[in-house]
Every structure is written in structure tokens, then in C-alpha cells.
Amino acid sequence: MKLITSFDEMRDAVKEHRRAGDSIGLVPTMGFFHAGHVSLMESADHENDMVVVSIFVNPTQFGPGEDFEDYPRNLDRDMEMAEQAGADYIFHPAVEDMYPRPYLTYISVEDITEGLCGAKRRGHFTGVATVVAKLFNIIPADRAYFGLKDAQQVRVIEKMVEDLNFNIEIAKCPTIRESDGLALSSRNMYLNGEERSAAAILYRSLQAAGEMISRGERDASAIIAGINKLLDSEELIEPEYVEVVDYRLLHPLEELRGEVLIALAARVGKARLIDNLLINLAQSPD
Ligand code: PAF
């Protein structure tokens, strides 16, 4: 596995593999890997001849007062994990190369970035779309891999790819969880012992929602109330939002139908955690 920081070197490596007829998988990340990242890399390795993993803590997707400076970083450990997971290249550009001064060009995906995390994190998805578009231009891969824990992010990237005609397939990968259901996230490291135990209620509340739906509940407000009741039972959880939306448009639903995303965000101590359940009711008999 090779570490590359220069755009020219990265482009040359991709060109060489293209000439050899290799298919290329890209796994965009901000590093500090956990089993969720590893599963993205393994899927990429399985489905492509060559895999590039980008590691870049992207300043434009962090708002003022967010954790850009504190965001955990450990390049040496990440490189070992990526190599074991089948990566061929780590692309690790410098901030000043990605954003030459003055930096003036951004990609803004409208409407679907207004709600859920976009409502609280103004500008966040513009930062995400911009950096992902830049990565797609530097590394024109066949497929790019993203985890569904960040479902709104995945939808924003899918829409950007569709609207701007990027020739790349977006592979959506399932959320990887701890044994008590907590979704893996680099931000889980901000939790102390008590907060970590309390955080398991996030997924438990989504599972309870899933059970209500299997019993036939289709009223979004009943689902939201059920989730909030469980979240309120944990003192250390400060819910930010609980919403039931249509996955494609990310607009709130009153009645569950089609591809439904039940998404939540909560503060637990210093950490802001998100999780969701994506359910396809299109095929259900009722
Ligand atoms: O999900 C992430 O780690 C980041 O938002 C991404 C997609 C790598 C863009 O910086």
C-alpha cells in the first residue's frame, strides 16, 4: 500500500491502473478508522481491482464551534488498518492544497440539505458535497463507498452525482454497530463510561420503532412519540431531532409509505451522535 499526498501523483497512479484495465473503488473518509470504515474498504476491495482510501479531515464541513480541531486523527494506525482491509493507496492531501487561497468554489445541493442535520449544521453539506466532488475529480473511480449511518449525506451525494453527471456509482453500505447496537462513529470516543452505556438507547429506540412498524403502525407522529419516550427515559441523552422522512426527498411524512428514513440526532455529553433506520415499505402487502 502506498501513501500519496500530491494530486499529480494520485492522478498518475489512477491513470496507470486505468491503462491496465483495472476497476477503481474509492472510499472517502476523515480517518480514525473503526470497523465501519473497514467494512467500506472490504466491500471496495471485493468489488474493484484497485482501492483508494482518502483520509482528509475536511474543514469546510465543520461549523464554527464544532470539533474540527479536536477531531481524532491517527494516520499510522489508519494506514495499518487500511492495508489489512485491502486498500492499495491512501490519499492524504494537505488542507492548503485542497483549498488554495482564496478558495471560491462550492457545491450546494438544495432542499434535501435543509432538514435533519442540515437544519442545525448550516453549510455542513455544502462542505461535504464540495470535498466529495473534488475527490471524484482527482480520483475518477468506478464506485465510491459511503456508510448509511450518514443517510442524509449519502442522499446528498447521490443527488449531486445525478445532477452534475458524475460518472461514478455510489455504493451504500450498512451501518456497523457495537454489540449493544450503538452505531460505530469516530465521535463515540468523546463518550465517558456512563454516556457510552446511555447511548445504546439511540438504536434501541429505533428498533422499537421498527417493531411498531412491523405491527402495522403507519402514523409518523406515533412513531416519533414512541422514540422520544424512550430517549427521554435516559437522562444523559439530549435529543436534537427525531424525524420520519421520505428517503428520496428527505421531506417529513405524516403516513409511512415507500422508502422511509427514521432519523435522529442527540447530544450525549460532548458528542453529537446520529443514527437512523431505513425501511422499504413499498413492497409490503398493506
Ligand atoms: O463521512 C465522512 O467521513 C465525510 O463526511 C466525507 C464523506 C469523507 C467527506 O469529508
Image: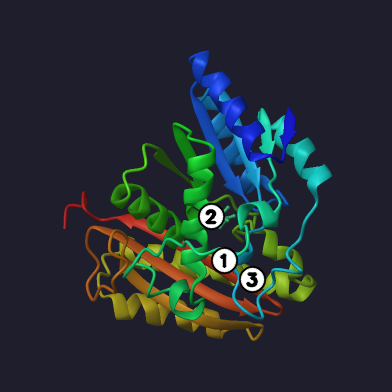
Tell me if residue 54 comes above or below residue 123 in the rendering: above
For ligand 1, the image quadrant comes to: bottom right
* Disc 3 residue type (three-letter): Ala
Q: Nearer the viewer, residue 47 or 263?
A: 47
Horizontal side, residue 21 vs residue 5: left or right: left
Q: Does any atom of ligand 1 lie closer than 8 Å to the CB of label 1?
A: yes
Q: CA distance from mark 1 to mark 3?
A: 24 Å
What residue does disc 2 label? 131
Horizontal side, residue 35 vs residue 133: left or right: right
Residues under numbered marks 3 and 2 in contact, where contact means CB atoms less than 8 Å apart = no
Horizontal side, residue 13 vs residue 239: left or right: right
Q: Which mark is residue 61?
A: 1
* Disc 1 residue type (three-letter): Gln
The quarter of the picture where the C terminus appears is bottom left
- At mark 1, the secondary structure is helix
Outermost residue to the top: 20
| Residue 108, quarter of the rendered image | bottom left
What residue does disc 3 label? 199
At horizontal 49% and vertical 71% (from top left) the residue drawn is 205
Outermost residue to the right: 76
Residue 237 visible, this angle: yes
* Disc 2 residue type (three-letter): Val
